[in-house]
Amino acid sequence: MNQTFDWSLVQSFLAALDQGSLLGAARVLNASQPTIGRHIAELESQLGVVLFERTGRGLLPTATALQLAESARAMEAGAHQLARSVSGAEAGVSGTVRITASQPVACVLLPPVLARMRQALPEVQVELVSSNEVTNLLRREADIALRMVRPDQASLVAKRIGAVKLGAYAHRDYLRRKGTPRQPSDLLQHELIGNDRHEDIQQGFAAMGYPVDRERFAFRTDDLIACWEAVRAGLGVGFVGDYMARTDPDVVPVLPMLPLPELPIWLTVHREIRTSRRIRAVYDFLAREVPQALG
């Protein structure tokens, strides 16, 4: 065996073994197919063995490859454990972090993210506050905030980590009863779910050239969770974030061509608190995972 054996090549070997092809391994590892092929060839050279037979239908592992797989998986498990140790518990990251977010983000988007964070940072407890008030951070009532508006206070640091895509949605039962709108003007013939005191949706209709008054909306609320539940109940066509709509397969998009704005999400923290290892670990985790949850 070559004494310069490169352990990092094991990842490509396991991906090729699991996927059965260089292309599949490349997709899993977000690498190029030639790179994976080069890794396999180099590993074979360093070990002095043949790991795969190249066939028309992909890669066929040799008996040697299957024998090495168990040890390779043990190495992979060790690497994952090392990564978890560095990012979380063994690095001494423990204690409580208080997070504040808008109601839909707090109730729908964050819980699955926080479930994954519980695995990565098991010694961290979370307090979640459903609120839109920026003053929560200024009064130190929260450590981290997720906002749809960038705060302008100098003592706060904000990082844009993604955007909420909005769409018009309706329940399948409603569409069976009322029909499916085919063009924006068709919405005026439908039951609409809109705002009570806020005028964002009315302004959106006006921007499309369809000025409407509040009486045009059959159901009105400024509570975004109530709006979502109204859509799910079949009250009419409503406007919600795509990430919310994905949680119910019976709620389907209508008029995907509507020019609806995206709402940016800002991850915000007090400047003086960024130096906390506990808060920094949670901040970094949310910055990484929330964009994936948005899709």
Image (spheres, helix red, strand yellow):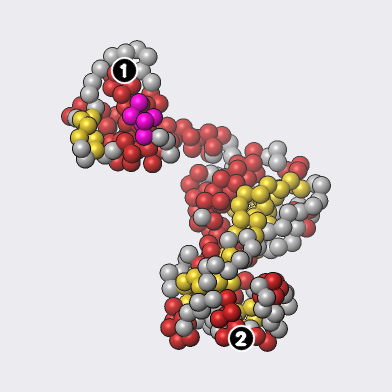
Q: Nearer the viewer, residue 42 or 76?
A: 42
Q: Quadrant of residue 272?
A: top right
Residue at the extreme right = 154
* Residue 241 % position (x, y): 57, 65
Q: Looking at the image, is 134 positioned above or below residue 29?
A: below
Q: Report the amino acid beneath label 1.
A: Gln
In this image, 150 relative to 103: left or right? right
Q: Residues within 10 Å of mark 2 (few under 14, many from 20)?
A: some
Quadrant the N terminus occupies: top left
At horizontal 24% and vertical 38% (from top left) the residue drawn is 58
Q: Quadrant of residue 61?
A: top left
SS at badge 2: loop
Residue holding disc 1:
46
Q: Is residue 1 left or right of residue 245?
A: left
Please state the horizontal and vertical placement of residue 235, each as a whole percent of the image. Answer: 54, 83
Q: Which residues are magenta?
A: 33-38
Residue at image point 68% right, 57% down: 147
What's the residue type where badge 2 is placed? Ala
Q: Which residue is mark 2?
A: 218
Asked if residue 186 is positioned above or below residue 12 in the image, the reply reads below
Q: From the viewer's side, name the closer residue of 40 and 33.
A: 33
Point 76% across, 54% down: residue = 151
Residue at disc 1, secondary structure: helix
Residue 228 visible? The answer is no
Instruction: Give the residue displayed 59% in from the left and 79% down from the top.
Output: 185
Q: Main secondary structure of the magenta part?
A: helix
Residues at discs 2 and 1 in contact (Cβ within 8 Å): no
Q: Position of residue 222 (x, y in %)?
A: 67, 75
Q: Is residue 106 magenta?
A: no
Res 192 label:
none
